[in-house]
Amino acid sequence: MGENKTDVLRGTLDLMVLKTLETLGPLHGYGIARRIEQVSDKLLAMNQGTLYPALLRLEQRGWIRSAWGASENNRRARFYSLTRAGRRQLAAEARSWERMSAMMARVLAGDSRA
Amino acid sequence: MPNANERLREELQGHFEDLVRQYCTQGMDEADARRAARLKLGGADQIEEAWRDQRGWRWVGAAGRDARLALRGLRRSPGFAAAALLTLALGIGANAAIFSLAYQALLRPLAFPGAGQLVSLFSVAPATGRLKPTGPSTSYLTILDWRAQNRVFTDVAAYRDSGATLTGAGEATVLAGAAATPNLFSILGVRPLLGTAFTWDRVQRGTPVVVISERLWRSRLGADPAIIGRGVELSGQIFTVAGVMPAGFRFPFAGGGQDFWLPATQDPNFRDLMPRRGGHFMAAVARLRPGVSLEQAQAAMQGISARLARAYPKELGGWTALVRPLRDDVVGDARTPLLVLLAAGGLVLLIVCVNLATLLLARATLRSRELALCAALGASRGRLAGRQVVESLVLSALGGALALLVAEPTERALRFLLPAGLPPATGADVAAFGFAFAAAVIVGLAASLPPVLSSSRSDLAPALKTSGVAAVAGRHAGRSALVVAELALSTVLLIGAGLLLRSYSHLIATPLGFEPAPVLFTQIGLPKAQYSAPDQWTRFYDRALEAVRNVPGVRTAAICLDLPLTGGTANLGFAVAGQPAQPGGQGPSADDNPISPDYFQAMGIPLLRGRNFSTADTANSPAVAIVNQAFVHAYFPGQEPLGQQLVFGFQKSEAREIVGVVGDAKVATVGEAPTPMMYTPYPQDPWWFSMLVVTANTKPGALAAPVRAALGRLDPNLPVAPTPLSELLKQSLEAKRDQALLLILLAVVALVLALTGVYGVMSYSVSQRQRELGLRLALGASPAALLALIGRETVILAALGTGMGLAAALTLARFLAGLLYQTSPEDPLTFVAVGLGLMATAVLAALPPARRAAGVDPMTALRAE
């Protein structure tokens, strides 16, 4: 992924969106935004509107797809869902995060064995 | 695009309302909730902008990745890459060269400022069938009248080719030049390098002035910076240099360029002809007034001509004016061949597309498993198609780059096709590059269609499972279409090339009507300053002939005016004595050719009837004439020409009795029909200009020096350059040969492409049926039966393809008719040869893969993939 802050943020956001969709199933933009806020414990404060270009990017990459549907309030809303490619991407990202945090843990602990 | 933004706005709106409801539920009042929601959502403009940016990046990102993948793929299959790139380089390269030539000849404006506004004016006489405008066709006085009476041109100038001998500056040399009215340069918009050129009043005052070329100034006058005002001696007369034209300036276009321009009224060659309203020997160029169209100018000039014809019925009755863009004069001859070449080039491009599509299709089916996997894992059909397109584009971009390497030397080698008058173009490289680029893109897109269509139309899943014969048959149609298309296109192209080849072979085998081999010739132009009276001309030629005959090794020496293959003719109107005279322009006309008695013998032209001229035919004996067969067919069909009297003459129009008939000799160029000609004894029809013709007992070339010496003893200042006539013949054939060569080159390219294409397509088509064949074998068919099956189907396809091609060629060949010599556009030999040849190639190409497929173990075939 990228080196600068925006890219890290973008990548993190992408991951969170994918995870949200995996956990909750197909969801509209508002729902995704709400869930991310809840889960990140308000740490990831952002303008919720910036979610939409990110959703577009994910769609362009082929990791999610979208379709019109009816929300709980019976309004027309665009629902996003995970594709198989997206599922694979999520799994791959999750693995790489795990590996990275395990490595960081070892480094920070100053393990004499390393 | 508007739909996508609509979608975003709708989503944002919905999101906003959800947020408002959320805050209201949490206890805020309506107004606060709305404000909070707006804050939370963020600025709509920023969001929309970020959204739009993201949309834009989609293509770039994906395309870049696909391109890198495509390059890697090419490196892994060098055979495929080589075949594809070679096809592209050859096809596009040849086309870029042709297109560049066509661009220079047809599209690029002439090198003068505002050249689009320049027109040529001609006089034509519709009643006599003289409709085709040819070079100088109007009298000086008429052009002056056109200039005075019109309101559609800013100015009108008269001009024509001229010649003079430069003396007093080293060796006497013949120079080519032009005679023109003083406004020629201002009309063309070209200013002299030095000096001020002509002005009307300076010319009127009578001081002889001349404008010279930069080439002459540099090579013979030492590039003297004080040249203006100096005198140069032309044909024995001193002219003051009034200006030097810039290097490369040339007008009129034909020929090798001019070294001098004289005011028309001061050129000794034509000075005396100026007052003759009936002499059609000047050409005219004019500049259209801004806002005036060609049609308007044409109408106006026709009106003026009608007025003039009424005022001068004898000289101008029946004549009218024709206005044509100046460009047509330059391009004229080359237009048809170039258009044919462009069409041929287009066909070659099509063949390249089909070849490339075949290669890509073959490759795609090899990778069909990989593609199916991609699709199964979620890649959309659009993405796959996009990837195919990018692959083709990458390939054709590389091919296009290679093509440029091929195009440059090809174009340089083919430059001879351009009419000699055009200066080399500066923008041609850009044009060629642009064309190659555009062609590469088009070819890439077109060639990627079949693979894209075949991969998106068919369900990719069956490629992974076993499939029956039926499923495979669906793709059969596409492959068959390719075979048919390849064969049809190749047929058309090869037939075109074949026809032109036959035409050329007829051309070089044509009898000329005379024996060119042992003949030496030289131009003799007597300068008016020293030889002003017609009897001086006659006396000079008498002495010249005698002097040359005394040179050892000379068999015959003769003179004439129009020498075959030199293109110069003097066309005069004539009347048959006893028939009522018709006003000028409406009567018959033929070429007048004053000769000496030995001329026919020297040229090997047979005397068919009556008698030849002799030394007894002098200026004082009864006026006689001899005509050729073409003349008899045209004007005395079925009648007895001997004894008839023709009234014509250049210096003096008088009645001449026809005393003989001779065979026809080719006039201007090989491949032209002979024109009616009237021969006269030169003492009875004197010209200051003539051609001396010498035949030798040995090689004519060896006589050049002694002949020149003999003539030099008569007049040391007279430049003569004895040349073997075979040189002229070679040049005349060269032009036609060059055209033929170009088309042969294109045909060879087409043949190579066609053969490899047909082979590739058949090969691919048959190998694709391995599964089906295996199935048949397993079901009990014998290998022989399989071969027969494939053979039968191949023959049907080949017949269909070549049949379509032959039909198309029959309709299109008509356009070639103008270029063909003694060859019919429906020449059966060519059609049959090409048709059978291509069919044979197609069937032969199908054999190896068919045999392989038929010999394969059925279980292997079924398991294959």
Image (cartoon, rainbow, N blue to C red):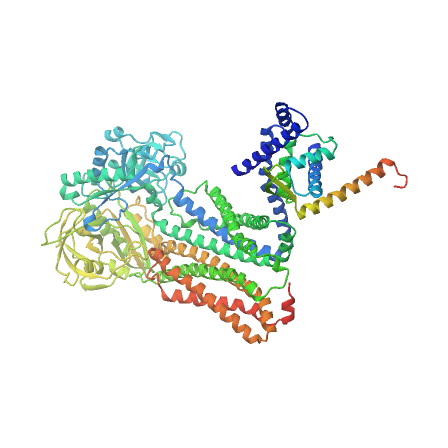
Whether residue A93 sits left or right of residue B553 in the image: it is right
What residue is drawn where x is 52% and y is 61%? B479
Whether residue B699 sits left or right of residue B448 in the image: it is left
Using the rendered image of the protein, determine whether residue B518 is visible from the camera's viewpoint. yes
Quarter assignment of residue B6: top right
Quarter assignment of residue B279: top left
Residue A52 sits above or below residue B816 on the image: above
Q: Which of B579 and B761 lies nearest the eye of the viewer?
A: B761
The x and y percentages for residue B365 are 59, 58
Q: Which of B850 and B371 lies nearest the eye of the viewer?
A: B371
Quarter assignment of residue B45: top right
Using the rendered image of the protein, determine whether residue B267 is visible from the camera's viewpoint. no
Q: Which of B538 and B310 lies nearest the eye of the viewer?
A: B310
Q: The C terminus of chain B appears in which quarter of the rendering?
A: bottom right
- Please tell me how many numbered marks the rendered image carries: 0
The x and y percentages for residue B662 are 22, 61
The x and y percentages for residue B759 are 53, 63
The x and y percentages for residue B356 are 53, 55
Residue extending farthest right: A112
Residue B487 sits above or below residue B225 on the image: below
